[in-house]
Image (spheres, grey):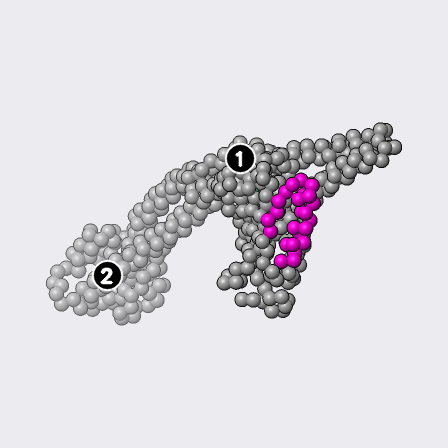
Amino acid sequence: MQVLLWRYFAIFTVLIIAVVSLVCFGVLGNAYSAQARDRITTIGRGLTMIIDGKNSQFTGEVGGEMNRYAFTEGVDVFLTGTDGQAFIYTTEPSDDWDSIFSELNSTVNGWTENRAVIYGSSSMLNYASCVTFNGEQCYLLVRYPMYIMTESVNSMQIYIIIIAAVTIIIAFIISYILAQRIARPIRTISETATRMAKGDYSVQFASAEFEELAQLSESLNYAKDEIKKSDDFQKELLANVSHDLRTPLTMIKAYASMVKEISGDDPQKREKHLQVIIDEADRLTGLVNDILNASKVSAGLSELNKKVFNLTEFIYGIMNKFDYLQETSGYKFYVDIDPNLYTLADEEKIYQVIYNLVSNAVNYTGADKCVYVSLKDMPEQSRIRFAVRDTGKGISDEEKEHIWDRYYRSKDAHARPVKGTGLGLNIVKIILQAHNFDFGVNSVKGEGSTFYVDFPEVSSNPDEKIN
Ligand code: ADP
């Protein structure tokens, strides 16, 4: 990238300098020759008027005036007959006078009153006009040597080339430094990203001088922290899950061996041992289901299948499932449910939500083993609020932010050891967000927690919604 940037900068400067130089070359050359033509025309016209006697203010000698122009303007002036005999001149006619005169003669093409022409080459510019001197037809020839000008133009052009070359070299150096300054932080970011990709999350993306790159570094640092968190969570989960899977599997194997070798003939013992196997197998199934559910829900594999159903009966139905805990483990469920409430949702998914929330309340409630479940109509908001309250240790404000995260499990000791995966509330969150339902938790540390979900209230008729 650095080379590319440098190349672009360099090409750009060379182009600009080339354009500027070309313009200078063209303009300089043209300006000089235009100026020379103007001057020779002014001199030629002035002298023509004097010789023709049309300048009434002129009283001096024609020869003297010709000499004055020759001296002040650096031109050679000749007054010559139509036969080629120069009779007044400012410089002695040179050896090539014959060819000079024949060029003049052929260019003017015969004496014609008032005719004037400018002709010549890059080294000599000529002005010729037909004049009448002392009643004789003759030619006035003004010669302007261009080589002095051409030389100064040439030396100017050499200066331009030198300046252009120096500017290009400076531009190359500046663009190299600039390209390096832009490319260096990008290279650093890319090297850091490579280290991170190899699993080194201790890296830090350095802030850069350019705002956009500084923002990129910031975003990458954020992404890195998130990836690290998820990586840590996954490692922790793997450790937890493998531990949680190993325990029931060991139990199942141990009790199966006991049934085979010891209790096979004793129906009472066998029954007890088989029940342990069944319970542990159930725990395994629950665990595996949780993990599968979480990945299935978050991968969006399961579409929502919404329909209107009786929420009151639905909640009663779920609470019945927890009845056995009242009988076997001394839990007390206080249920306060308003009658005949209907909502529109995916029944199967909402089952997972309610079941997870009530299970958590059971798992995390205090020593009194009380769980409070309510379903209340809030007609002014067209909502139904489901709430489940426990009397456990509660959740700190800091923890509240994390409990909905995948694999999050509190490190706090609860009333009884809870074997979980940290997936339950994450599943709840994903399902409720997909429904766009309000939900949350109110909790005071040491006084228990209340988890709630707001369902939209609809009429019992599936086609008619309550506003
Ligand atoms: P799990 O219960 O399997 O650990 P969850 O996702 O259901 O996973 O809950 C995540 C964490 O939230 C739990 O580890 C626990 O710390 C906390 N939590 C959930 N429900 C309650 C509750 N009713 N009271 C106190 N803490 C809770």
Tag shown at residue 192: 1
Which numbered disc covers residue 376?
none
The residue at 74%/41% (across/down) is 282
Camera-nearest residue between 303 and 273: 273
Give the residue number, with chain letter if any, for mark 2: 42
Residue 151 in view (yes/no)? no
Secondary structure at numbered mark 1: helix
x and y, in percent, of residue 401 in the image: 51, 43
Quarter-of-image position of residue 234: top right
Left or right of 184? Residue 39 is left
Decide which of 378, 216 is in the foreground and name it: 378
Mark 1: few/some/many CA within 10 Å (<14, 14-19, 20+): some
| Residue 317: percent from left, percent from top | 67, 54
Tell which circle, 1 or 2, labels the residue nearer the N-terminal end.
2
The answer to whether mark 1 is within 8 Å of ligand 1 is no
Closer to the eye: label 1 or 2 = 1
| Residue 203 image position (x, y, % from top left) | 52, 33
Q: Is residue 342 above or below residue 242?
A: below
Q: Residues within 10 Å of mark 2 (few under 14, many from 20)?
A: few
* Picture quadrant of residue 98: bottom left
